[in-house]
């Protein structure tokens, strides 16, 4: 943690990145480990790296395609790079990515926040169909007010217009939104935009020297209610 928890006050909504924050991006490759000859971690890391790289390239070039298309392109690169030429395996990996597992603490955390009167939403690069499928797979339909995709504006994070989507959809000022992401580039972008930001640093990553810093750094969403001053079992009107 990086500041006095009492400083994270006047929050009306919590907005979460999806991939790597609520949903485990390594789950698809992990569940296919035998078919990947035990190289699932290598494939997952390369797949994720190229997936993000392609969103940034597409945003800079102005030739948007949705995240599902980009996810497939990134997987094709990763499989070819590691020598996997198996159309059935590709299909299986894409199917698994469509319904990724949520991290274990996610449902309980969201329910505590909602019980305390906070609005909860996803703000994600994911296409609408991907977000709907992941939310349903995790059983989070009743725990989220919105699942906001970049798709309507045709540009990816960390463009400021993406963060503005949450302000507009939730009708909450940026300074009253607590934004959470496991991706530091997303943390930086959201903080620079004006959100109150918590970095969910699950992997022990180093910070990048870019403008926009989180107010808190934690390793799991379990820590969030305490940062917001929510006691176990508490329900308030916020």
Image (spheres, rainbow, N blue to C red):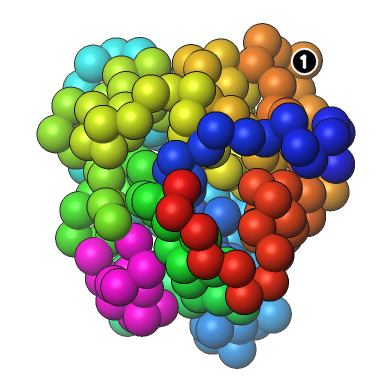
User: In the image, which residues are magenta?
Assistant: 132-144
Residue most toward the bottom? Answer: 34
Q: Residue at x 56, y 55 (%)?
A: 20
- Picture quarter containing residue 105? bottom right
Q: Residue at x 52, y 66 (%)?
A: 235
Q: Is residue 34 magenta?
A: no
User: Badge 1: few (under 14), some or many (20 or more) residues near its Cα, within 10 Å?
Assistant: few
102 relative to 74 in the view: left or right? right
| Viewer-nearest residue: 209 or 221 | 221
Q: Residue at x 20, y 53 (%)?
A: 128
Q: For mark 1, give the secondary structure.
A: loop
Q: Is residue 142 above or below residue 15?
A: below
211 relative to 175 in the view: left or right? right
| Viewer-nearest residue: 117 or 89 | 117
- Picture quarter containing residue 150? top left
Place of residue 142 in the rendered image (x, y in percent of width and height, measured from the top left): 30, 73
Asked whether residue 150 appears in the rendered view, the answer is no
Q: Quadrant of the N terminus?
A: top right
Place of residue 204 in the rendered image (x, y in percent of width and height, measured from the top left): 84, 48
Q: Is residue 35 above or below residue 91?
A: below
Q: Is residue 135 magenta?
A: yes
| Viewer-nearest residue: 20 or 96 | 20
Residue at the disc numbered 1: 209
Q: Which is the main secondary structure of the residues drawn in magenta?
A: helix
Q: Is residue 50 above or below residue 235?
A: above
88 relative to 186 in the view: left or right? left
Asked whether residue 112 appears in the rendered view, the answer is yes
Place of residue 132 in the rendered image (x, y in percent of width and height, measured from the top left): 23, 65
Place of residue 69 in the rendered image (x, y in percent of width and height, measured from the top left): 24, 48
- Picture quarter containing residue 172? top left
74 relative to 195 in the view: left or right? left
Q: Residue at x 36, y 80 (%)?
A: 139
């Amino acid at each position: 943690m990086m500041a006095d928890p009492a400083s994270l006050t006047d929050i009306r909504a919590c907005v979460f990145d999806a991939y790597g924050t609520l949903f485990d991006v390594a789950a698809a490759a992990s569940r296919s480990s035998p078919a990947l000859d035990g190289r699932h971690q290598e494939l997952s890391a390369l797949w994720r790296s190229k997936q993000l790289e392609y969103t940034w390239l597409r945003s800079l070039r102005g030739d948007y395609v949705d995240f599902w298309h980009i996810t497939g392109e990134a997987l094709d690169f990763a499989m070819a790079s590691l020598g996997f030429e198996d159309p059935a395996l590709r299909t299986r990996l894409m199917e698994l990515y469509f319904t990724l597992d949520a991290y274990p603490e996610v449902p309980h955390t969201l329910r505590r926040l909602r019980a305390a009167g906070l609005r909860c939403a996803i703000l994600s690069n994911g296409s609408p169909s991907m977000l709907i499928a992941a939310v349903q797979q995790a059983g989070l339909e009743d725990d989220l007010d919105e699942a906001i995709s970049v798709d309507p504006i045709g540009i990816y994070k960390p463009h400021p217009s993406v963060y503005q989507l949450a302000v507009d959809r939730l009708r909450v000022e940026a300074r009253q939104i607590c934004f959470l992401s496991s991706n530091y580039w997303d943390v930086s972008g959201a903080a620079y935009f004006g959100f109150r930001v918590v970095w969910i640093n699950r992997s022990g990553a180093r910070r990048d020297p870019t403008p926009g810093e989180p107010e808190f750094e934690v390793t799991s969403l379990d820590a969030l209610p305490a940062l917001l001053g929510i006691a176990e079992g508490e329900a308030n009107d916020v």
